[in-house]
Image (cartoon, grey):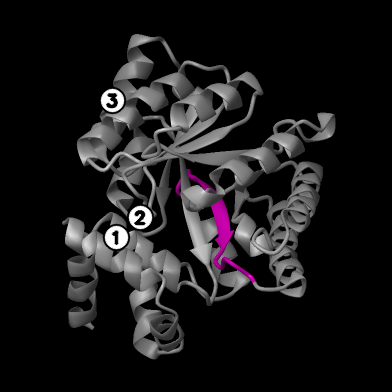
Amino acid sequence: MPFLRSAFIALSRNRPMRRFVERSSIGTRLSSRFVAGMEIEDALRVAEAVNKQGMSVSLDSLGESVTSEIEAYRAAEVYHRLLDAIAARKLNANVSVKLTQMGLEQSPVLAERIAKNLAEHANSVGTFVRIDMEDSSLTQVTLDIVRRIHAFPNLRGAIGIVIQCYLYRSQSDIEQLLAEGIRVRLCKGAYKEPPEVAFPRKADVDANYVRLSGMLLNSSIYHGLATHDEAMIAAAKSFARQHGIDASRFEFQMLFGVRRDLQRDLVREGFHVRVYVPFGREWYPYFMRRLAERPANVFFIAKQLLRK
């Protein structure tokens, strides 16, 4: 459904619509399928429940593209509170961070300073920071920041990155990241990108996902394969089996509220599963991108609302 995908991506950038929906009661009901709640405590409660089901968690305080240094530090403080809570509650969890939420568009130096502080904090409490990838205009600067932080001897292994397989450049990026020992979360990608930089056909994106997941699985580094696509999961299982790669050497990653049945099945089969748990009041862009990725979610949510 290319038309629906484009429509939802366009809506994700519509600020008047965002302001209206985020403040409405029906908007809160709509978001509850994919967003753990509005507050830190909501996310921690969900993280504890997910841990009890035998799965780990990545906590994401929703928000992006802050407009001032004060906003960037305020967003970072939420993550510092999350890291302290992860340690205090002994959660099997890490955090996922967008650099535009840390001030990247105002000052890459500011964003790097904040991300380094978060990696130091995460390292001190025995967990990990994943830097999310945003649209392709920010790919290089995001990679550069993660590589510089990871190069500090005390932060090796404390920070990782997301690579989107729909970009043509992703194979060379992964080759460089593997050479430097940086952990990767591989996903397909959720932004609208021009054909000059990204594969326009789903079949090509899928083929690249399989190719890149094989590269990650064959490395000695612990990576995450983020997908709900059963064909991609089957391909990864097959590759691991054929190459004698133990299930403990990687993890599958899935979004909160999406394919819970598949999450449970993978745990029963002995695979590591991490659930990406977003929370916060600025949920609208994230929610719209989830609908763009899988328009069938629209019909599912409509059914849930009609039942109430």
Which residue is painted at 38% across and 18% down in the image? 240
**Pointer 3 with pointer 1, Cβ within 8 A:** no
Q: Nearer the viewer, residue 227 or 241?
A: 227
Q: Is residue 171 left or right of residue 181?
A: left
**Dividing the picture into quarters, in which one does residue 169 lie?**
top left
Residue 271, position in %: x, y? 41, 31
Q: Which residue is mark 1?
A: 292
**What SS does tag 3 mark?**
helix
Determine the CA span between mark 3 and mark 1: 24 Å
Q: Classify mark 3: residues with Cα within 10 Å, few (<14), some (14-19) or many (20+).
A: some
Q: In the image, is residue 64 above or below residue 282?
A: above
Reply yes or no: does residue 14 show up in magenta: no
Q: What mark, if any, has residue 192 been given in the picture? A: 2
| Disc 3: which residue | 235
Which of the 4 quarters of the picture holds residue 302? bottom left
Residue shown at the point (63%, 51%) measured from the top left: 91
Q: Give, as a three-letter code, the residue at label 1.
A: Ala
Q: Amino acid at mark 2?
A: Lys
Is 58 on the left-hand or right-hand side of 104? left
